[in-house]
Image (cartoon, grey):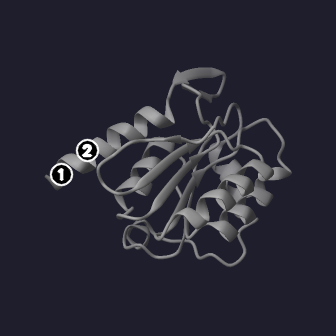
Amino acid sequence: RLQPVENPLGITVLIDYAHTPDALKNVLQAIRPLIKGRVVTVFGCGGDRDKKKRPIMGAIAEELSDRVILTSDNPRTEPPLDIIDQIERGIQDMSPLSEAEFRSGKRGYIRLSDREEAIRLAIQSATRGDIVLIAGKGHETYQIIGTQKRPFSDYQVAKKILSEKAGKKE
C-alpha cells in the first residue's frame, strides 16, 4: 500500500490510500519511528461520503504529524472548503499557518484546497530527513470534482515536483 516516490533529495515521499481514521492512524504510527525529521501529512476526505470521520481524521493527523496540509480528495458534489472546514474541527492545538509560515518549517497546519498545490507546498518546504505522506487517494489516477472524473495521480504529481526541486539544486 505505501508507495514511495524515489528522489535524490533525502526526503521520504509516500503515497497511501489511507482514507479512514484507522488507516491514517496506522500508517502514521508505522512511519513515525522510521525518521529523524518531521512528518508532513497531506490529506482530505471524499465528498458525499461519511462526514462523521472528517474531524476524527483531523485529530489523528494533528496528533501524529508535525505539519499538516488539509486539501481536496474527491470532493464530488460537495464544496471542497466545506469538507476542509469539517476536518479542521478535529484539530484542537495545532496553529493555522500562512503559506510563508508553513514554508519556514513551523509546526502547524494550512488549508489548500487545490491538491496539486498542496502536494507542491509539502514537497517544496520539506528538507532532508523529512517524510511527506500524501494520503487518501493512493493508486487512484483520477479526482472526482462535481460529477466529472479528471485525470490526477498523486504519484505523478509528486514525481514531477520532486524532479523540479532536484533540478533547482544542481
Identify the residue position indicated by label 2 in the image: 164
Closer-to-camera residue (142/16): 16
> In x, y percent, where is residue 158?
41, 41
Amino acid type shown at disc 2: Glu
Q: Residue at x 55, y 62 (%)?
A: 34
Q: Residue at x 45, y 48 (%)?
A: 119
Marks 1/2: CA distance? 6 Å
Image quadrant of residue 86? bottom right
In this rendering, does residue 111 appear at all?
yes
Q: Is residue 78 left or right of residue 158?
A: right
Q: Is residue 25 left or right of residue 149?
A: right
Image quadrant of residue 122? bottom left
Q: Residue furthest front?
A: 34
- Tell me if residue 68 comes above or below residue 53 in the rendering: below
- Tell me if residue 51 comes above or below residue 97 in the rendering: above
In contact (CB < 8 Å): disc 1 and disc 2: yes
Closer-to-camera residue (78/157): 157
Quarter that holds the N terminus: top right
Tell me, for residue 141, which label it has, or none. none
> In x, y percent, where is residue 41?
57, 57
Identify the residue position indicated by label 1 in the image: 168
In this rendering, does residue 89 appear at all?
no
Q: Residue furthest left?
A: 170
Q: Residue at x 39, y 54 (%)?
A: 123
Disc 1: CA contacts within 10 A as few (<14), some (14-19) or many (>=20): few
